[in-house]
Amino acid sequence: MAALPLEGLSAIVTGAGRGLGRAEALELARLGASVVVNDFGQPGRDGSGQASTGPAEEVAAEIRAAGGRATAHTGDVADHQQARELVQLAVDTYGKLDILVNNAGILRDRMIFSMSEAEWDSVIHVHLKGHFNTTHFAAAHWRERSKAAGGPVYGRIVNTSSEAFLAGSAGQPNYAAAKGGIVGLTTSTALALAKYGVTANAICPRARTRMTEDVFQGFQEPGEGQLDPLAPEHVSPLVGYLASPAAGKVNGQLLVVHGGMVAIVERPRVAAKFDTAKEVFSYGELDELLSPYYEDRPAGETFAAAEVLGLKRG
């Protein structure tokens, strides 16, 4: 009988008590990984409510009931010390950490002119700092192991970005900024850790979860007996692949995934280039060059999130 692709490996999945994180934790376990299921357990998608051990414990129990290995961690990854304890828990429980999937997040949506400082800070704190915290301690673990081994070790990071960063989202300036920052964190981490044998990639998932129920309301509703095209189970196989030995050459990449589709996103390319006829541009010269360029483009041209890769209402 062939070994499972993640057999003998250990993983952390943050925000794994519900939705995407839960599906990802179950998939990694199905592929053979031992999983630390992290979830702070607050009931509100805005990070409100009393923290609870329930969601993380329930998913860990579900993995164990299916014959896998799992333990729960109910700390807040946005807290630096609790993120340290999360990574240490994986090392202490399973001997090492091999895979880190960063998924935890909250929403506090508001138009930019109405958003409070607290609404901005809280989303940046959980998404971007949360990704940094766990990545920092996992990276230190892999670097130490690599030095002890005298060569590369096994390490995989899968971060969670969003098309809100790629395409814009008018009512989510905090979320879009955090998700853009996660892409920058991912590519920087990929370059820094490659020599230690570690890869870092980011996904932009579309999934109907507690956090996105408003965004995807009315989109591609499933037919009777059919899997929802926006079910988290369409996303988790890609996470399993990126966490596996098969993805050893996939590093510093951004992938959009949903409903049986994976798209690899290129780095930004130059759309047009203008050179000054003199030593320094003048206002008039820039007006002559740039204004006609933008006048020839469709008025108010933007990339709507639902149009980037053909998402349509049902």
Image: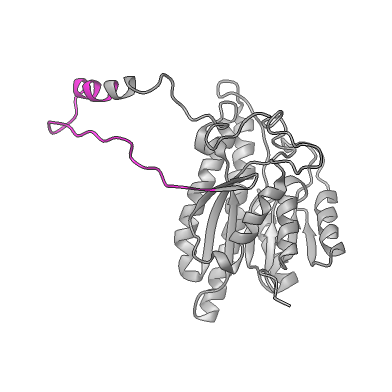
Q: In the displayed structure, does residue 8 sit left or right of residue 268?
A: right
Rendered position, 58 above or below 97:
above
Residue 35 can be seen in this image: no
- Between residues 229 and 164, which one lies in front from this camera angle? 229
At 69% from the left and 35% from the top, the residue drawn is: 212
Q: Position of residue 53 (x, y in %)?
A: 83, 51
Q: Quadrant of residue 12?
A: bottom right
Q: Position of residue 232 (x, y in %)?
A: 71, 46
Magenta stretch contains residue 279: yes
Magenta stretch contains residue 282: yes
Residues in magenta, as a range: 263-291
At 78% from the left and 53% from the top, the residue drawn is: 74
At 54% from the left and 32% from the top, the residue drawn is: 307
Rendered position, 262 above or below 248:
above
- Between residues 190 and 84, which one lies in front from this camera angle? 190
Report the quarter where the N terminus lies. bottom right
Q: Quadrant of residue 111?
A: top right
At 60% from the left and 26% from the top, the residue drawn is: 171
Report the quarter where the C terminus lies. top right
Q: How many marks?
A: 0
Rendered position, 248 above or below 160:
below
Q: In the displayed structure, does residue 149 sit left or right of residue 283?
A: right
Q: Position of residue 180 (x, y in %)?
A: 51, 41
Residue 309 can be seen in this image: yes
Q: Position of residue 92 (x, y in %)?
A: 72, 71
